[in-house]
Amino acid sequence: MDASSPSALTDEREPPRGPLLDRRQQLTDALAASPYDLILYLERAVVYSNLAYPDLAAGDAYRALLLADEVRDESFEYHEQAKEALHGYQTIPCPEVLNHGCLVKDLDRLLDGDGVEAAGEYNLLANLASVRCFQILSISLLLCGCLKSALTFCERGLNMVPHNRELLEIKEYIEQVARRRLRLQPDEPIEINGLPDRGVVRREVYTWNTYEPDRFSEESLSFLNQQLSGMAPKCEVRVSDLPVLLDGESNADGDDIIPTCNQLGLFAKEDIGPGEPVLEEYSLLTANNRHKESICDACGTELPPLQSNSKAVSCPECYDTIFCDDFCFEKAQKQYHPAVCDKDVDSIAKDPDAHDIDQSLYLLLLARLLAMSTHQEIHPLEVKEIKYIWGDFVSESMNDIDGSITDEPPPEWTLPFSFKYNVEIPLHILEKMDVDIYATLEQHDLWVFNTAYSKFRGTASARKNLRDGRPDVAAVHPMWCLANHDCNPNVTWEWGGRMVLSARKTRVLGKQPGGIRAGEEILNHYCDVDLPVQQRREWAQGSLGGWCMCQRCRDEAAKPVPNGVMKGMNGVNGVNTTNGTNGVCLCGIYEQRGQT
Ligand SMILES: C[S@@+](CC[C@H](N)C(=O)[O-])C[C@H]1O[C@@H](n2cnc3c(N)ncnc32)[C@H](O)[C@@H]1O
């Protein structure tokens, strides 16, 4: 942490990781035993801060803030439990985690006028805790790059204790970063609504995440192959050797040998003829961001016009939810619908602003996953539709930083994050589903949501609405998404309630005849393969997680460029136009239809 940065977050410099991880586990166990204890949440938030997970620190501070509200308001659902959990703590001396900086000096200000007795010991503790929550939330969200939310929480804290030194320092720091990022003059006012609120955080298999399978084990491969057998009888899942991808242009295009790594892929077990279907996968992990749209709630297909012979069915309990037919209704009843039936979750995150479209679709995929896990009574990361997906995780050691506050989160942090979509709304959805977010911490901790988001980003497909071209339906197809990308694909794909892969009739390169021989890998495409190499690489970069190094790209990129012609597309050499190419700002969400 540099000398000019606020002191409110960490109390130590670069503390060792091992003991902090042990402490995190102790506090997690303590929370399992005492789930409404806001002090434990605050303690864990500080541990997360010291471990350089500012997003997880913000998540715990927010839960503590909600519990502080529960303590103060006796009409709230968990009021008794939250108060009871404070039994044994006192204000003087107060718990160590609240005795931070000048906070205890502000006690008078938090008394509500007439001293401890009138305010009540519990309320006073809750007030102190709220201020500590605001400190942790504001500094942590600043570190993630979410400046608007950071400033909002900081202001809320200052409303309670206007002279709190730590909050004033944090505010100054947020403003400094905002001025630099928005290139504002020192005297120009900062407009809170104009501040950036999307950040990035670590994308990793957390050390404590015991749910990730060994995807290469016999057990995993045989499970995946058993799942695949009904959908793609001529295919199997195998380990594939893929190029290690770089962030951008390199000199490796002309090299004969490039570094590779093991991943999974789909392979043909038998010959597949040109035009023959390769895989047909039903969509259930779907999301639709339009309110009251005539779309099947289960598979996301456009519903047929309502006529007397229509096969569409509505749920007999909540009439608004409509399915294509009995098949979809039964799938929904069995796998998720009872968890959300008549729970008023339907309107959440619907009809978003244009700049929130991608976030809303990923959020609604998370909501579907939470409904599936709640109804099936399994951990969200155990749901088979996402369990075997690789989330393009980055190793923990690469993500680890020294905790310094800088203008931007480090480049190794690649998981998009916002307070609203990663923390606030997922908890709100669970509350609407009548889930006790405190008692189910193991299933609904923020790191679980982040892991699911890592898996969705890079594998979800989206469909645009034909009326206005906005993506409004998304889905994750766990088997389809095992097929790797190549710019000379041997399949084409089409999605509408089912994801269908078919062998190409003709290959793109040299118009060679299509068809796939036994033993060959199924080569899908994540971008428009009719584009020139630079454009293809830019487009596919979001979902591939790097610069495409397939043979076609390397050959085309290594070719000498004629004089006067730039390698970039449309003259915008070096500018990432991935999102502009198809008018969709959805990094990792592919379009509905693969070209033939
Ligand atoms: C949709 S998944 C494909 C299945 C994945 N290989 C697996 O093991 O689950 C997409 C990820 O696979 C990898 N991938 C797919 N095609 C690739 C290619 N042509 N070169 C390198 N990596 C590729 C990238 O890591 C990408 O993020």
Image (cartoon, helix red, strand yellow):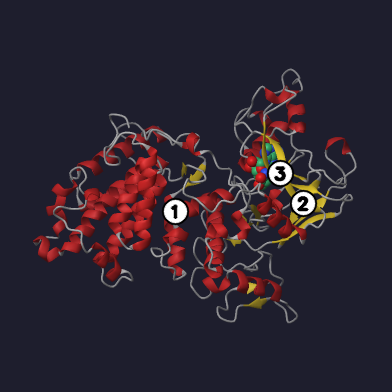
> Looking at the image, is mark 1 or mark 3 earlier in the sequence?
3
Which numbered tag is attached to residue 236?
A: 2
* Residue bearing mark 3: 239
Q: From the image, which quarter does the N terminus lie in?
A: top left
Label 2: element kind: strand
Label 3 with label 2: CB-CB less than 8 Å: no
Judged by depth in the image, the label closer to the viewer, 1 or 3, is 3
Tell me residue 172's x, y (percent): 28, 38
Label 2 with label 1: CB-CB less than 8 Å: no
136 shown above or below 438: above
Q: Is residue 128 left or right of residue 428?
A: left
> What's under tag 2, amino acid-wise?
Glu
Q: Is residue 455 left or right of residue 19?
A: right
Which is nearer the eye, 277 or 47? Answer: 47
Determine the CA span between mark 3 and mark 2.
10 Å
Label 3: element kind: strand
Residue density around tag 3, few if under 14, some if 14–19, many if 20 or more, within 10 Å:
some
Tell me residue 372's x, y (percent): 56, 65
Residue density around tag 1, few if under 14, some if 14–19, many if 20 or more, within 10 Å:
many
Which image quadrant shows ligand 1?
A: top right
* Residue bearing mark 1: 446
Determine the CA span between mark 1 and mark 3.
31 Å
Which is nearer the eye, 39 or 124? Answer: 39
> Looking at the image, is mark 2 or mark 1 earlier in the sequence?
2
574 shown above or below 211: above
Which is nearer the eye, 379 or 19? Answer: 19
Tell me residue 51's x, y (percent): 38, 41
Q: In this view, which residue lies farthest toward the left?
A: 114
Label 1: element kind: helix
Determine the CA span between mark 2 and mark 1.
34 Å
